Each structure stands twice: as structure tokens, then as C-alpha cells.
Amino acid sequence: WYQGRVREAVVSTQSTGRVFVLCTSIPIFIVPLGILHCCIKSDSTPETTSEKLGLLEESTQNEKGAGKGADEEEYISVPNLVGRVVKASLFVFINIFQGYGSILLLTSLMREVNEKTCRTLHDETGTESRMDEACAMVDGNQFLLVGLVTGVGNVLGRGLGYLLSKRIKFKILQPILAVIITVGYSLLLLKHQNMALTISAMGLCKTVYSMMRCETSLISFDPVFFGTGAIAWASAVVLGFGMVGSAIGNGLAMFISPYVTVQITVGLSVVLIGVVVSINERD
């Protein structure tokens, strides 16, 4: 009977896991790409090759006549460029580290809570105090909670981040968000941990991460912040740090203890507070 229950739980979890991975891997971008490629046409097109050549020559001459003055007018030079790149790189690195590893971190924390709950039940009932795989596994309903936290956090966070960034200055909004996400991850270190607290804290962190992600996306390609002459290499450096943050966040969440990962994340979150406070070049 015991082996049958374990086998049933394993099969159920594997089936739910496959459906979850399938639903999160569907390439939904193929449909709009097909629409753009096949259905959207230009309203007016040149009828002959000579018309095309004439339009091309006219456009080239206009660009040559106005190009030099436009380039001089739009050129932006900024002081302390290296400092700006360093601060923006740390901002993006820590923000993406917090967000990209949160899905794997949440499932690891849920498994830890399941193990603790099973251990308590074993102690209360006086049965053999050993952990079995079926008891500690993240089940189907919990995978749905992971999807809910991720989806709602992203949608709600991006919307709120866009609206608030239009109404509140960077130097006010971003430090407040950095403090909130630090508190959210700190809640995960409480000794008496339960599933409700874990999901609520990670939902808060995911939402705040998405709110800050709006700003990190903008600052990565901001010619006013980096200057027009250095925007290409500065953006490349910042995006590179973001990719490194994603890889490290996922790696820590998968291969080491989740509570050690949370401690590292809390430490980086404290650093993030100082980073966003030091970025006084943005309004």
C-alpha cells in the first residue's frame, strides 16, 4: 500500500510537471509574427523600379543636407561616464538576480516547508522519522501557485512600475522599492516558516522586482544617462551584467540550500539600496 501511494504521487507530480513545462514553453510569439509577415502590407508602394530609385536618391540627398546639423544638435556628453556605467550595471545585475532565480527559489522553499511539515507529522504520530520523496515533493496545486505568483507578479508589477515611474521621481521611488524587496526576502528567513508566508513574501518580491525592472530596462538604453557617444558600449556592459545576474541567480537557487540563497539575496538587496540612492543623475 505504501509503495503504491508513493508511486501514485510520483506519477501525478511528473504528469503535472510536464503540463506546467509545456504551458510555459508554448511559443506564442509565432502567431503575431505570422500576422505581421503575411497580413500587414504597405498602403502605398512605388509601381516601377525608376520610382524606387528616384525616391531613394531624394531621401539620400535630404539626409546628407540635414545630417550634419542634426548630429551636432543631438550629441550628448555626460560627466563621470565610468561611474554611471558601474552603478547602472550593479542596479541591473542585482535586480535580475532577484527576479530570474525567484521561480526556482520558490519551489525550493516550498519543498523545504513540505519537509518540515512532514517531519512534524512524523514526530506527532510517533511513526518512523524518515522522509520519503512523495511527502516532500512540490505537488500539482503548489505548481499552480508558482505560476500564479509569477504571472500576477509580473503583470501587476510592470503596470504599477510604469504608472508610478511617471508620477514619482527615481530618487524617491527606487529606494522605497529596494527597501520593500529587502524586507520581503528577509521574511523568508524567519524561523517559523509556513507555506502561506513563503508564497506571500515571494509574491511581494516578484511584484516589486517587476516594478523595478521597468526602470532597469529604461536605464540600460538611456542616451541621456550614458551620452550618445557611449550608449552602445555602455548598454552592452550593463546588459552583460544583467545576463550574469540571471545565470548566478538561477544557479544558486538550483544547486545550493534555498536559505543560503535567500541570505545572499538579502545581502545584495541591502547593497541595492545604496546603489539606487547613489544614482543621483536620474530625476
Image (cartoon, grey):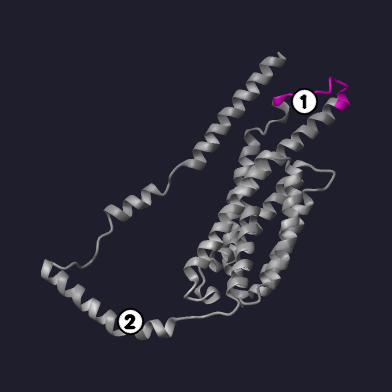
- Magenta segment, which residues? 123-133
Name the residue: 63% across, 63% down. Answer: 91
Q: Which residue is mark 2?
A: 67
Location of residue 151 in the rendering, given as x and y in whole percent from the top left corner: 58, 50
For marks 2 and 1, give the CA distance.
Answer: 72 Å
* Count of marks overlaid on the render: 2
In the drawing, does residue 70 fall left or right of residue 62? right
Q: Is residue 116 above or below residue 85?
A: above
Instruction: Give the dominant element type of the magenta stretch: helix, strand or loop.
Output: loop
Give 86 or 151, whichever is nearer the viewer.
86
Query: What kind of element bears circle 2?
Result: helix
Residue in the image at 68% along x and 54% along y: 205
Residue 202: percent from left, percent from top = 69, 50
The residue shown at (75%, 54%) is: 266
Q: Quick check: 62 above or below 105?
A: below
Disc 2 marks which amino acid?
A: Gly
Image location of residue 75, percent across then percent down? 45, 81
Residue at mark 1: 131
Residue type (three-letter) at the residue carrying disc 1: Met
Residue 175's mark? none
Left or right position of 31 against 145? left
> Quick check: is 254 in the magenta stretch?
no
